Structures are given as structure tokens and as C-alpha cells.
């Protein structure tokens, strides 16, 4: 026969009464864990997040479109004139254009699940 442990009558696990010694030990553990910034960041604790100021959601598509049009204009002008300065400007601008396009694509895929609530992901 196995010896069974008595069941706790409480239905809520947060309804536990701790002794002062246990509360002190628990608060020390929580203080040590909250002091570890790497652990807090890995756990995604909401107190670790910096408050962001509200930003208009239309800046990313607009900046991507502006960078894309400037890049296309520079590459066409650089090919037609063979001016090294124009080609170097295009070479400097193109990675920024790709980065913004990648950010826009990430936003669209991340918010794809919430599309029905808000409309299109480009808004």
C-alpha cells in the first residue's frame, strides 16, 4: 500500500499562508532574481520594457517608399551617366532601403494574425 498525502482543501494555489521566515526568504529570492537583468530580459518581464512613445504607423511604409524611389532614381541616373559619385550614393542608400523593406515585411507577417481586428497590416 502506498501512503497518500492529504489533499489541500484550498482551490486557489495563491491562497497559501506563509510564515514570516518563509516570506522573508521568498522576498530575498525575488530581489535576487529581479536584479539579474539578463534573466529579466530573457523572461520578457513587462517591467523590463522601456515605455515607447506612440508613433504613427504610417512612417515605416512612407519612408520605405521614399527610400525605394530615391534608390531607383539613383541607380537609373548612375547607369545613364556613369558618374561614380551617384553610384556611391546609390551604394550607400540601397542597404538602408533593404533594411526598411525587411522591417516592413516583418511587421506585415507579425501582424498577420491580427489583421481581421485592425484591417490591413499596412495601416
Image (cartoon, rainbow, N blue to C red):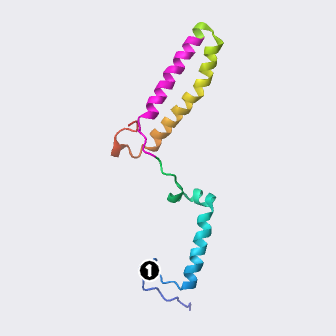
Q: Where does the image place residue 44, in percent across and percent down from the top left?
A: 54, 57
Residue pictured at 51% horizontal, 20% vertical: 70
Numbered disc 1: secondary structure = loop
Q: Where does the image place residue 63, in percent across and percent down from the top left?
A: 47, 29
Query: Up-down: is 52 above or below 104?
Result: below
Residue that carries the numbered disc 1 in the rendered image: 15
Quadrant for the N terminus in the image: bottom right
Query: Up-down: is 12 above or below 56?
Result: below
Compared across the picture, whether 123 is left or right of 4 comes to left
Residue pictured at 47% horizontal, 48% vertical: 52
Q: Main secondary structure of the magenta part?
A: helix
Q: Where does the image place residue 28, in percent across and percent down from the top left?
A: 60, 74
Residue pictured at 62% horizontal, 69% vertical: 32
Query: Up-down: is 104 above or below 77?
Result: below
Residue pictured at 58% horizontal, 70% vertical: 30
| The furthest residue to the right | 84
Q: Viewer-proximal residue, 65 or 116? A: 65
Tell me where the magenta segment starts and ends, as one range: 53-78
Crowdedness of circle 1 by 10 Å Cα count: few (<14), some, many (20+)? few
Amino acid at each position: 500500500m502506498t501512503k497518500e498525502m492529504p489533499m489541500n482543501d484550498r482551490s486557489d494555489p495563491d491562497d497559501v499562508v506563509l510564515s514570516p521566515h518563509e516570506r522573508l526568504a521568498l522576498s530575498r529570492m525575488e530581489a535576487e532574481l529581479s536584479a539579474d537583468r539578463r534573466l529579466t530580459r530573457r523572461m520578457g518581464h513587462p517591467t523590463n520594457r522601456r515605455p515607447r512613445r506612440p508613433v504613427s504607423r504610417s512612417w515605416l511604409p512612407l519612408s520605405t517608399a521614399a527610400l525605394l524611389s530615391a534608390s531607383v532614381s539613383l541607380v537609373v541616373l548612375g547607369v545613364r551617366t556613369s558618374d561614380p559619385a551617384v553610384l556611391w550614393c546609390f551604394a550607400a542608400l540601397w542597404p538602408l532601403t533593404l533594411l526598411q523593406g525587411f522591417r516592413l515585411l516583418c511587421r506585415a507577417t507579425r501582424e498577420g494574425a491580427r489583421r481581421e481586428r485592425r484591417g490591413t497590416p499596412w495601416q
